[in-house]
Amino acid sequence: MSPSEIFGLAGTLSVILAASAVVFASFKTNTAKVWKEEAEAQKARGDRLEASLKEINTRLSRIEAENKQLVQLLTSLDPSRLAVVRLTTTPTEE
């Protein structure tokens, strides 16, 4: 093999290696971009769910307080009637 053939082969090989390095780097960059976008979308979704959960907890606390007041009002009006209502309803999980 003559030196010119070796240099020609080395040049072709270096072009192929450079092209494959560029393709690999491009693939890696695009993959990182996609994962970053997905992570940002999931974070935004998590933030929305957290805000929704806080709102639900606030509403539940308010409803429990109102329920407590209503039970107190009912028992002050007619305690025996409230006892009958409690006996006929099915208990809920606490």
Image (cartoon, rainbow, N blue to C red):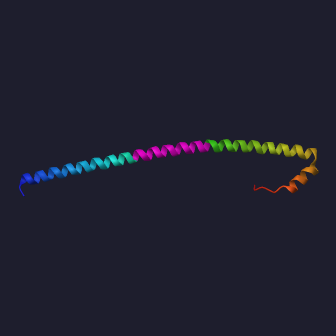
- Residue shown at the point (76%, 43%) measured from the top left: 63
In the rendered structure, the answer to whether residue 69 lies left or right of residue 3 reads: right
> Residue placed farthest to the left in the image?
2
Quadrant position of the N terminus in the picture = bottom left
The percent position of residue 21, horizontal first and vertical second, equals 27, 49
Q: Is residue 39 magenta?
A: yes
Q: Is residue 83 magenta?
A: no
- Residue shown at the point (48%, 46%) measured from the top left: 39
The percent position of residue 20, horizontal first and vertical second, equals 26, 50
The percent position of residue 22, horizontal first and vertical second, equals 28, 47
In the rendered structure, the answer to whether residue 15 lies left or right of residue 1 reads: right
Q: How many marks?
A: 0
The percent position of residue 59, horizontal first and vertical second, equals 72, 42
State the extent of the magenta-drawn residues as a range: 32-50
In the rendered structure, the answer to whether residue 88 lies left or right of residue 30 reads: right
- Residue shown at the point (93%, 44%) measured from the top left: 77
- Residue shown at the point (15%, 52%) measured from the top left: 10
Query: Secondary structure of the magenta portion, mostly?
Result: helix
Quadrant position of the C terminus in the picture = bottom right
